[in-house]
Image: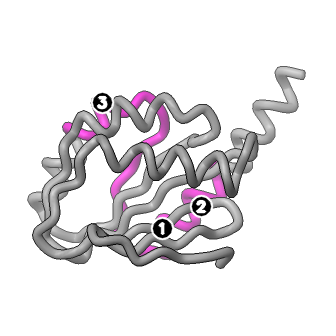
Amino acid sequence: MITSFDFNFGIVEVHNDYILSVMKEGVTVFSKYNDLLKMGANQYYKNKPFVYITNRINSYSVDPAIHMEMSKIKNLIGVAVISSDPRQKMQTKLEKSLFKKEFKLFETLEQALEWKNEILKKHIRDSKDVN
């Protein structure tokens, strides 16, 4: 882990090639929080590809519009949601339709990290093929 932050809305960990967040119980995640993600992307990843992983262990709301804004972060190549809650499966279907890049639901952090590694490798391979 590079660093971590304890915000009023949740805990955010910055790792080498991903950001892991755990939102606090009862908060609503608005698109204004996307500004923090953009700042983190610029400060810690610059032009390096990364994945955002959210571990939804607490009950909170997500404004789906945030995913349209997140899609604009050039080096953010995917979002992983971790939850075993059946309601989250329905919510993530809506979120996925608004996010224009890789987006997937997992039941464990280990599964999300494996997927993160796969899409990062694919992104790097595809980038080399273009050049």
CA distance separating discs 3 and 2: 21 Å
The amino acid beneath tag 3 is Leu
The colouring scheme, among rainbow, by chain, secondary structure or one colour, is: one colour
Secondary structure, magenta segment, majority class: helix
Q: Quadrant of residue 60?
A: bottom left
Q: Nearer the viewer, residue 75 or 114?
A: 75
Q: Which residues are magenta?
A: 94-119
Q: Amino acid at mark 1?
A: Leu
Q: Residues within 10 Å of mark 1 (few under 14, many from 20)?
A: some
Residue 130 % position (x, y): 83, 21
What residue is disc 1 on? 20
Residue 70 as seen in the image, left or right of residue 24: right
Residue at 23% x, 74% y is 24
Secondary element under disc 1, as helix, strand or loop, is strand
Q: Percent position (x, y) of residue 101?
A: 48, 33
- Mark 3 — residue? 98
Q: Is residue 64 left or right of residue 113?
A: left
For the residue marked with disc 2, what is the amino acid? Answer: Tyr
- Please give the name of the residue rendered at 68% of the width and 75% of the height, measured from the top-left corner: 2
> For the residue carrying disc 3, how many other residues have a C-alpha within 10 Å: few (<14), some (14-19), or many (20+)?
some
Residue underneath mark 2: 18
Q: Is residue 22 visible?
A: no
Image quadrant where one finds the C terminus? top right
Q: Are marks 2 and 1 in contact (CB under 8 Å)?
A: yes
Split into 4 quadrants, where in the image is the N terminus? bottom right
